């Protein structure tokens, strides 16, 4: 995101590590736009946005939902929280710029779910290939339009996945489910950005399991994620080198 914003030249990006940290900063600094990860560990992006909209000092600020998964369920939640619109990772440069222009320009938008069945989260369709075709396209396009540092960021995500898996395991060893949730969330995001859909779905299940402190399920998922990471590694390496 920093590289995308930097490309615009006249925009400034400030970040927060959590919704708890971000809410007071938003109220104080009054940004023109907020990009909100809807599945943040701790206070979720959905609940954080509801708080922003309930606060008179921040209710006017457009909030864009950002997620690694564009499920109907997530879109229904985002619409209920009065988000401006919805962006899915990996982020497309053109989509991000279009949203920024629309939000700052006062344009009105709405989030429309893809299906009328909104009672429960739908199953995400499996990708037929090793990596998501849409993610591959976005990464290849971004390599041409963004600074050289972009591919370094993507490579850092790829190399960071085993480290996050180890952090998740270490957190479980000490019953630190909050830290485990944070590690699983990052693992989900990194995998989705790289187009490793199956790995991202496993990490999402692990993230949910940490909320319920389901140690047995997380342990099984950790083993599955290790196997899947090594399965997708050749495809990701080829993508980064192409």
Image (cartoon, rainbow, N blue to C red):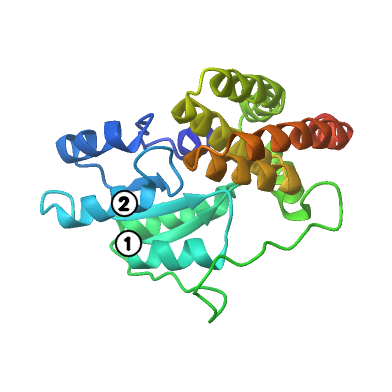
Could you tell me which residue is drawn at 65 percent across and 40 percent down? 217
Against 122, is 91 above or below? above
Say which mark, if any, is on residue 236: none
- Looking at the rendered structure, the secondary structure element under dot 1 is loop
**Residue 47 in the image: x percent, y percent?**
31, 51
Could you tell me which residue is drawn at 84 percent across and 31 percent down? 233
Instruction: Give the quarter of the image for residue 26.
Output: top left
Instruction: Give the quarter of the image for residue 54.
Output: bottom left
Going by the picture, which residue comes out furthest to the left?
Answer: 56
Q: Give the mark nearer the N terminus: 1 vs 2.
A: 2
Could you tell me which residue is drawn at 66 percent across and 25 percent down? 165
- Looking at the rendered structure, the secondary structure element under dot 2 is helix
- Left or right? Give the position of 119 relative to 32: right
Against 205, is 2 above or below? above
**Residue 83 in the image: x percent, y percent?**
35, 60
**Residue at which label 2 appears:** 47
Estimate how packed mark 2 is, as few (under 14), some (14 to 19) or many (20 or more) residues with alpha carbons within 10 Å: some
**Residue at which label 1 appears:** 81
Asked if marks 1 and 2 touch (Cβ < 8 Å), the reply is yes
Judge by depth and name the residue closer to the eye, 209 or 145: 209
Estimate how packed mark 1 is, as few (under 14), some (14 to 19) or many (20 or more) residues with alpha carbons within 10 Å: many
């Amino acid at each position: 995101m920093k590289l995308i914003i930097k490309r615009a030249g006249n925009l400034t990006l400030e970040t927060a590590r959590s919704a708890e940290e971000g809410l007071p900063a938003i109220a104080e600094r009054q940004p023109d736009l907020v990009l909100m990860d809807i599945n943040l560990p701790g206070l979720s992006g959905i609940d954080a946005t509801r708080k922003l909209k309930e606060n008179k000092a921040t209710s006017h600020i457009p909030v864009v939902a950002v997620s690694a998964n564009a499920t109907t369920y997530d879109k229904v939640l985002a619409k209920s929280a009065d988000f401006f619109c919805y962006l899915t990772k990996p982020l497309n440069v053109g989509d991000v710029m279009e949203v920024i222009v629309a939000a700052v320009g006062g344009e009105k938008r709405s989030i429309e779910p893809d299906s009328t069945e909104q009672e429960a989260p739908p199953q995400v369709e499996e990708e037929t290939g090793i990596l998501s075709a849409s993610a591959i396209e976005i990464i290849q396009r971004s390599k041409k339009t963004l600074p050289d540092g972009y591919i370094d960021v993507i490579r850092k995500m790829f190399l960071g996945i085993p480290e996050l898996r180890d952090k998740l395991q270490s957190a479980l060893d000490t019953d630190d489910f909050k830290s485990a949730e944070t590690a699983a969330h990052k693992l989900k995001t990194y995998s989705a950005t790289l187009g490793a859909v199956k790995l991202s779905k496993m990490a999402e299940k692990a993230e949910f399991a940490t909320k319920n402190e389901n140690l047995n399920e997380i342990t099984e998922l950790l083993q599955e994620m290790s196997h899947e990471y090594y399965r997708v590694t050749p495809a990701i390496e080829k993508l980064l080198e192409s």
